[in-house]
Structure formats: structure tokens, C-alpha cells
Amino acid sequence: MLEKLTQTFGDIVRTIGGKSTISDKNIEEAVDRIKMALLEADVNLRVVRRFVNATIEEAKGEKVLRAVDPGQQFIKIVYDRMVALLGDTRQDLALKGPDVVSVVLLLGLQGSGKTTSAAKLALFLKNKGRRVLLVACDLVRPAAAEQLAVLGAQIGVDVFRGEGADPLAIAKLALAKAKKELYDTVIVDTTGRMQVDEAMMDELVRMRDLVQPDEALLVADSMTGQSAVDIAKAFDEKVGITGVILSKFDSDARGGAALSLKSITGKPIKFIGVSERPDGLEPFYPDRVASRILGMGDVVSLVEKAQASIDKVEAEALEKKMADESFTLQDYLDQLRRVKKMGSLKSLVDMMPGMAGQISEEQLEGADMKYEEAILLSMTRKERLNHLIIGPTRRSRIARGSGTSVAEVARLIKKFEKSRLMMKKVIKNKKMAEKMMGGAR
């Protein structure tokens, strides 16, 4: 998401960031480009005007024109304005302690990703140590309850479906079950419609009054742009929402919803859907998203993803293998899978400073890495543990099994051997440096 916007802002940052002097004209030209980029991204016109006026007012002040590094000072102003536009700070869920049942009411139109977001949120909270019960109260969309049951089974979270056609009765029974069986969090997947209508809103108001939610989260589709903002206003006026989950944030949507929601509705974006996988829900950090939009990367999120996919003990064991050359093709396969677990290569590259929008999906897909897992999986475990036994006959068999060529198999093995030597040198140099630093104390 926000790809075109990121590219435009990245160009502006590169153009003005290195200037040793800056004039009113430079500022006006940069702000004009920013204004056009925001309008093209389908950001609300009122929001664009506020953003542009505040940026010009601050940028034309003495502190920029006379700053030691005016280019960087201007970028800092744009960054601060962007963070404010997105919501200033991360907004956590306001849930009670583990001894009391907390209720999260999920609202949204059909097709917004409400049911899948319910499961993703359940997994997120389960990983935080909470005991979650999902409740299927969307009885309008065919198979919504069945979909939630399937997703619940995938993530290991209980789903309460109940019987009958009264969603309020089902919610009441679910709350009683949660209290009796010591669940601390109940997530209610509510009725959705193709569009906002009075019947749906009346039912949601009754549901809200019955369950008394700690959080009423609207699931809005990023791809609907300004429509998502109008939908959020309608739900907030009728039912009252505490925040937004912006689904399909990994899509090629222009970004108007993300950049307009907080300013227009006053409600924070609390989570973003970043993939179709059950773990594809992330807390929304305005400062990190602003940093990515300006092409500065998001190193904090990148590190967090890495930490989530490999723990300290594994990292130390891996370092030891690299140092004594016992790193095998099996270890190589394990690392490939960890990278996949962290998300798409495109999303990881976009988190690196200065890399957002610089490498296309096609360029990444064309890399050798696309076929490496298939080649490795076509090997026997014995071959992965000792690549030296892979002679011409075995290479032919592996190539046939992976749908690649003998040359590609040979290239992977050669790349692996080079990587192993390079890793050994890196570890050796690191240890030498640590020894020298220790001796210098």
C-alpha cells in the first residue's frame, strides 16, 4: 500500500534533503508536489488543505530558512505533520485485566474482511497470553459462521456458534459461557450488509447495548479509499466506534483512507491487515508508517519481525554452526522458511531505509530465491545434511523433482558454499573485534 505516494515523497526527500540553502520558492515547489501526491492518493480535500497550510506555515518560519541544515529541517517538519495526520501515537486496545471478561465488538460491511480480521485479532491476543472466545453473530452472510469456525480451528481459538437465528441470543449465551469457563476476551463478529442501512444499524445498537463492549472496532477496506472514511463516520454516528482495523493494507490501494480517517472521524487506526495469513495483522504505528511513506524505512518493525521468527538460543546455535562450518543445506532451508514467515520480500525491502519503491515485485520474483526452496525440498534429508554427496546423478534427479535445471541446482550449491565461507569470515572478524575491544578496556 501507499507505493506511489512513497515513491513521490521519497523523491521529494532526496531532492530537498541535501540542499545547503533553502528558499521560499523551494518550499512552495516541494509543498505543491506533496499536495498533488496526497490528492492522487485520494486523501480528503479538507485534510490535504490542513496538512499543506500547516507545513507551509512552519517551513517558512525562521527555524528552517536559517537552520544549520534547512533541507533536513524541512523533512522533519513534513514527517511530524504526517505523523500527526496518521494519529500521533500508537493506540492500544482498552481491555480489562485477565480476571474480568473484555468484549470486542467487530463492525463492518460485507466484503470488508471483518470475519478474517476477527480471527487475526484473536490470534494476536492469544499470542499476548489472553484466552479468547470468538462468537459468530453474522447470520446474514451465508457461511460466515462456518468460515469463522474454520479459521478458529486453524489458529487454535474456540468459536461459539449457538443455535437459532437471533444474534443477540447467541451473544448472550456466549458471554455466559465466557464467564463460566474463564475466557478473558470475547470477540463478536457481527452482522454485515452490502451497504449501510437502518435495519443493520438498529441491530448493532441493540448488540452494543447488550454486550457493553470495551472496544467497538470498525473493519474498513483500505481499497475503498474515501468511502472507508464515510462508512466510519456513519458507524460512529449510529453505533459509536473506538477505533478502526484497516484491512487489505498490503493492497495497491492509494492510501486515502489511512491518511484521512483520524482527521475526519477522530478515531484512531488500531490495526492494519498486512497479508491473508492468520498472523497478518499488525498494530498501527503512525510514526513508523510516516517513516515508510517518506522513504526512510521502518527498521523497528523489521527487527521485530526478525525477533518473532528466531529466538536468541536459535541465533546462537546458528552462529556456532557458521563458525565451525557445520552449517548445512538443511539450515539454509530453515532460514529461507524464516524469511517467508516474516512476510513477502517486497514488504521487507520496503522497511529498509531508502529502499521503498526502488525494487519492483517483478524484480524480486525473478530472483533465484523463488526456486531455491523447491530445489532444497527435492533433496533427501541426507543430501541436505551433506551436500558433498550430491553428484551428477543426484543433481539430475533433484532438477527433475523441482522443475528446474541441473545448472540451477549446481548454482544453488555453489552459492551455498560461497555463503558458508563468507559467514565463517564474518563470525571470525566479529570475534577478533570483540577480543580487541575487550583487551582495550
Image (tube, grey):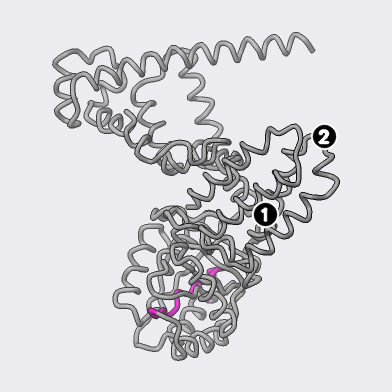
Residue at screen point 51% across, 76% down: 231
Circle 1: residue type: Val
Q: Quadrant of residue 73?
A: top right
In-image side of 421 versus 36 (left or right): left
Q: Which residue in the protein does label 2 denote?
A: 68
Task: Relative to 302, say whether 2 is above or below.
Answer: below
Q: x, y (%) of residue 296?
A: 61, 40
One can see residue 123 in this view: yes
Task: Relative to 196, say whether 260 is above or below.
Answer: above
Residue reaching furthest front? 25
Picture disc at residue 231: none
Depth order, front residue of 315/335:
335
Q: x, y (%) of residue 290?
A: 62, 50
Q: Which residues are magenta?
A: 180-194
Residue at screen point 80% across, 43% down: 64
How much space separates mark 1 and mark 2, taking CA atoms?
A: 24 Å
Q: Which residue in the protein does label 1 denote?
A: 83
N-term-proximal mark, 1 vs 2: 2
Which element is circle 2 on?
A: loop
Q: x, y (%) of residue 422?
A: 46, 14
Q: x, y (%) of residue 43?
A: 56, 63
Circle 2: residue type: Val
Q: Residues within 10 Å of mark 1 (few under 14, many from 20)?
A: many
The secondary structure making up most of the magenta span is: loop
Residue at screen point 68% across, 32% down: 18
